[in-house]
């Protein structure tokens, strides 16, 4: 019975973190996204799982690395219509609305690469070698939205 207020406090704190932390949505034109990727991407590899898990990884998953773009921040439009620099972290996601179909393509922003007028990215990190990368032609993109769980932004100069 003594632990009940403590447990209630933990649950309340967790719920506050979820509901007050929130997710923010930003937009960017397909041309601006392509320009910023073209000018700023620095292809590199990193392991999509923590170091301690790599040691215990299933033997047939020997290559757990993921290519990433190395972009630290991007200029985009916030919900109020202002230009901001959005810091990119491992939870930032990109959602692409396509012209040719009604479907949307989602991928983690840090895994998105621009190669030969095509965006290539991953929806998952752990199974990135087992699940084929998402590929979208730049000409087929109608709208781009960027989602950030805990956004860090600063005002961009026009």
Image (cartoon, rainbow, N blue to C red):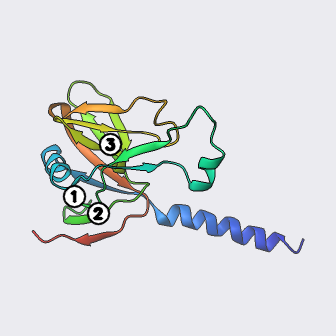
Residue 30 placed where, x, y %? 17, 44
Q: Is residue 153 above or below residue 50?
A: below
- Quadrant for residue 22, please give it: bottom left
Q: Which residue is mark 3?
A: 95
Q: Quadrant of the N terminus?
A: bottom right
First reached walking from the N terminus: tag 3 or tag 1: 1
Cβ–Cβ under 8 Å for marks 2 and 1: yes
Distance between the Cα atoms at labels 2 and 3? 15 Å
- Binning the other alpha carbons within 10 Å of mark 1 as few (below 14), some (14 to 19) or many (20 upward) gives many
Q: Position of residue 80 (x, y in %)?
A: 23, 63
Q: Residue beneath label 1, please?
A: 76
Separation of disc 3 and disc 1 at Cα?
A: 14 Å
Identify the image quadrant of residue 59. Answer: top right
Q: Quadrant of residue 122?
A: top left
Residue at horizontal 84 percent and vertical 72 percent from the top: 3
Q: Which mark is residue 13?
A: none
Between residue 141 and residue 1, name the one nearer to us. Answer: 141
Mark number for residue 86? 2
């Amino acid at each position: 019975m003594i632990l009940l207020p403590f447990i209630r406090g933990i649950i309340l704190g967790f719920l506050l973190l979820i509901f007050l932390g929130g997710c923010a949505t930003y937009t960017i034109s397909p041309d601006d996204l392509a320009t910023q990727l073209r000018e700023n991407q620095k292809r590199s590899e990193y392991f999509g799982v923590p170091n301690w898990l790599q040691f215990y990884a299933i033997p047939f998953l020997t290559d757990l690395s993921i290519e990433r773009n190395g972009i630290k921040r991007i200029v985009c439009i916030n919900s109020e219509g202002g230009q901001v620099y959005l810091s990119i972290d491992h939870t930032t996601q990109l959602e692409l609305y396509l012209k040719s179909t009604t479907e949307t393509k989602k991928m983690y922003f840090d895994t998105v690469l621009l190669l030969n007028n095509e965006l290539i990215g991953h929806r998952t990190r752990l199974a990135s070698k087992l699940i084929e990368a998402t590929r979208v032609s730049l000409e087929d993109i109608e709208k781009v939205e960027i989602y950030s769980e805990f956004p860090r932004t600063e005002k961009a100069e026009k």
